[in-house]
Image (spheres, rainbow, N blue to C red):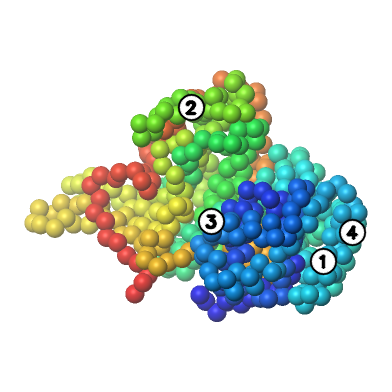
Amino acid sequence: MSKHESIAAAGAVYYLFGATGDLARRKLFPALFSLYKEGKLAEDFAVVGLARRPRTNDEFRADVYESINEFCRYKQGDDETWKKFADHFVYMSLDINNLDGFRELNNLTEELDARFDIPGNRLFYLALSPELFGPVSLNLRDGGLLESKGWNRLVIEKPFGYDLQSARELNEQLSHVFKEEEIFRIDHYLGKEMVQNIEVIRFANAFFEPLWNNKHIANVQITLSETVGVEERGGYYDKSGALRDMVQNHLLQMLAMIAMEPPSRLHPEDIRDEKVKVFRSLRPFANSEEVRRDVIRGQYSEGSSRDKRLNGYRQEDSVNPESKTETYFAARVFADNFRWAGVPFYIRTGKRLPVKTTEIVIEFKNVPDNILFARRHDLSPNLLVIRVNPMEGIYIKINAKKPGVDNTVQPVSMEFCQSCQVGLNTPEAYERLIYDAARGESTYFTRWDEVAQAWSFVDRIAEAWREDNESLQFYPAGSWGPEQADKLLAEDGFHWWPVNGQDEDNVIWISGSSSN
């Protein structure tokens, strides 16, 4: 743990709206416990769980206990540690439309401030539907919860709106209560170790940054694949689809991290300024014909994986049997700026694919065809691969001489596997993001102009799809998506590179680690 990371966040009251929900159970409670175990939460804090259903404090703490034992990278440990941690948790049943309830919450907060010597800081985490963000914010203000002497911060989950218009309306509601610098919009992919590592890989290594441009890079491929279907989220997903659920946030954010210019300072606003410039440079789709040419829209049909029969999307619970919702998205995207002009960014995401992984592949341009080794051998392009999830690490693929006397050239991949080191206990994304929000560190949260630019880009695609019911392609569950996604790259002379979990033939692996 670095000196910077060991600093405890300022004392605060953490309000978890939606405290009986799945996000709190799987991510938020475990994150808070891990921060407490590592000394990043001092003793001057309190957590108020808020939801409509009734709970006693003891029942709420029992829920937290079970959550930690099931999902936390640290278990609850000795009884004394758990007791001290759990003592900071209280529960209140709250009707978010009842202003009097917020006034009662304010009274409870004053008691907690006095009990734990909290300096009036407030962090409101809204694990709620977006349509509730505005009403809750207004009631927080009118209920007196924003009048303390400390800071106020609002943390909200995606989706931030359904399109640009709804996002603007939502932002307008929030801006009546909170300043932009007080709003922390979570995209949990920005909390992942290897996404945050992109800046270091690019800007701290002299042999990458000079090559990070259209003179040396042939294409960039970003894959976010899932093996699961929609599970219990059929009702939500059928109104959202892959475009809104994954592309508008996760994929475009990773693209921006890869494509951004070096910031003038390592300051949150300077970094986010550079990301906004990338979004503004994305070539918009002018019409439905361009969308049909460069975007693949797919939906999984019946299939199989590992000898298990899988339903098609239209057979899933709460899904319209005639649904046109996409479960797969692939696109060829261009950033029309000086650094990236002409370099295609291929992005794809989908459900019911063969492998669960998130990877970024940087394919460098090959050596000229007429030099000695290229004439004698079929040289493979050099690759830099950033593995984001579930495996974390990087590998570099180069060409090297095969041992022997025949001067055969073969690809060699040198790998650094961060997540598979023995004893490594990698912090989860939500731990970093909650810790950052408590410290006011906004680098890895999305600013309003980022959100607006991303919606502006994807809205053109959604609008074209509304006019074109024939663009939906079907792919068997358990496959890699529609064949058209492969043709998209083949048109440019490229192909999708294998991701972690797929076999890659004729490659020699040299492993590395940071344990030395």
In the rendered image, the vertical position of residue 440 relative to residue 129, given as above or below: below
Distance from the alpha carbon under mark 2 to that under mark 1: 49 Å
Where residue 308 appears, as percent x and y from the top left, is: 39, 31
Q: Amino acid at mark 2?
A: Asn
Observer-nearest residue: 88 or 448?
A: 88
Of marks 2 and 3, the one in the foreground: 3
Query: Where does the image place residue 424, in percent across and percent down from the top left?
Result: 42, 66
Residue 109's tag is: 1
Q: Which mark is residue 71?
A: 3
SS at mark 2? Answer: loop
In the rendered structure, are the residues bearing label 3 and label 4 in contact, judged by CB atoms less than 8 Å apart? no
Q: Which mark is residue 482?
A: none
Q: Mark 1 belongs to which amino acid? A: Thr
Q: Amino acid at mark 3?
A: Phe
Residue found at x 32% / y 49%:
381
Q: In which image quadrant can residue 496 be found? A: top left
Q: Secondary structure at mark 1?
A: helix
Alpha-carbon distance for marks 4 and 2?
49 Å
Q: What distance separates the C-alpha of mark 2 from that of mark 3? A: 28 Å
Which disc, if any, is residue 103?
4
Which residue, given by chain and number where applicable, does mark 2 sit on? 311
Using the rendered view, name the quadrant where residue 491 is placed: top left
Cβ–Cβ under 8 Å for marks 4 and 2 = no
Position above or below: 418 against 236: below
